[in-house]
Amino acid sequence: MSLKVFITGGTTGIGLALAKKFLAEGAIVAVTGRSQEKYNAIRDKRIIFYQSDVAKSDQMKVCVEHFIKHQGGLDIIIANAGIGYSEKSAIPNFAESKRIFEVNVFGVMNTIEPALEYFHQKGSGHVVCISSIAGFNGLPGTSAYAASKSAVSKLFESYAIDFKQSNIDVTCIHPGFVDTPLTQRNKHPMPFIVSATRAGDKFYSAIMKKKSYYAYPRFFSGLVRFLSFLPRSLYISMMRSKFLNYSVK
Ligand SMILES: NC(=O)c1ccc[n+]([C@@H]2O[C@H](COP(=O)([O-])OP(=O)(O)OC[C@H]3O[C@@H](n4cnc5c(N)ncnc54)[C@H](OP(=O)(O)O)[C@@H]3O)[C@@H](O)[C@H]2O)c1
């Protein structure tokens, strides 16, 4: 029987790469996004589309329940949709910061809530989120993005403990830099950047192995992880240096 997979924000980037990989492996796949145009640009129309905003819980409930009803179930839900700042600034843009939390944190909860209701009834399921290595530390110029990813990583760490007794698998993925529309506007260096296809293949494999925690690329994520073990005052002094601080005024 085909796996039934629902991915938020799957019209470009990592979500689309995952959608294509699951499809190639025989799964039934739906993606979401706000823009119909982005979906229209996808050639493979076997990918089902729901136009919706993850920040709106009522919209997420409707489309997840529609998918379950019309595809006869759901096996994996992937909370992938996420946004960053339009510009990395040392002066926080609070309107953007609040929207980042709405999408990257509450959007994840809005996505998995209707799926979990179904998984509890079914007695099994798999919830996945795409966090980021940006959540390992506070980062210059991208405060709410780093904090939002830190929040979802910790949410999923708790879920991995809590959901075990309900037979629901939990996977939290921490990508480094991936070449997508999100990063194509970055002006700073992006060490160890990988293509979306490569990232999609690696994340697919981590999901199928039901890893609760996965970070990739391994060396770069390990390095960033190491920074999170440093005394915070040392880390802050290091990151204030011109070499590492790429936020603009
Ligand atoms: N690229 C990287 O280097 C990188 C690294 C670490 C983590 N990540 C994370 O990976 C995830 C995917 O990023 P990406 O690089 O693939 O970005 P992307 O190419 O910009 O794709 C984002 C996708 O999310 C959708 N989306 C954005 N806001 C949405 C909303 N409110 N409701 C529903 N869909 C929404 C977009 O479609 P619409 O605009 O049409 O809604 C698009 O399909 C994000 O959570 C990001 O934080 C990315």
Image (cartoon, rainbow, N blue to C red):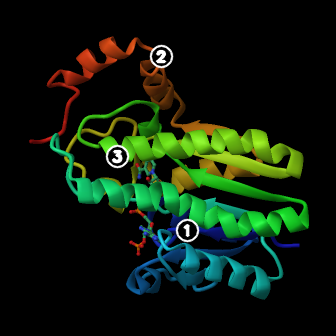
**Quarter of the figure with the C terminus:** top left
Image point 43% across, 26% down: which residue? 224
The picture places residue 179, in percent across and down from the top left corner, at 38, 53
Specify few, some or many for label 1: CA neighbours under 10 Å numbering under 14, 14-19, or 20 or more. Answer: many
**Local secondary structure at mark 2:** loop
Image point 42% across, 13% down: which residue? 230
**Quarter of the figure with the N terminus:** bottom right
Question: If you read the primary sequence from the N terminus, does the residue marked by circle 3 or circle 1 appear first?
Answer: 1
Which disc is residue 92 wearing?
Answer: none
Q: Amino acid at mark 1?
A: Thr
Which disc is residue 8 wearing?
Answer: 1
Q: CA distance from mark 3 to mark 2?
A: 21 Å
Tally of numbered discs = 3
Q: Are marks 3 and 1 in contact (CB under 8 Å)?
A: no
Which residue does the numbered mark 3 point to in the structure image?
144
Q: Is 71 positioned to the left or the right of 33 in the image?
A: right
Asked if one can make out residue 211 in the rendered structure from this viewpoint, the answer is no
Q: CA distance from mark 3 to mark 1?
A: 20 Å
Question: If you read the primary sequence from the N terminus, does the residue marked by circle 2 or circle 1 appear first?
Answer: 1
State yes or no: Cβ of the residue under disc 2 lies below 8 Å from any atom of ligand 1: no
Which residue does the numbered mark 2 point to in the structure image?
229
Image point 51% across, 36% down: which residue? 217
Q: Is 61 positioned to the left or the right of 130 in the image?
A: right
State yes or no: Cβ of the residue under disc 1 lies below 8 Å from any atom of ligand 1: yes
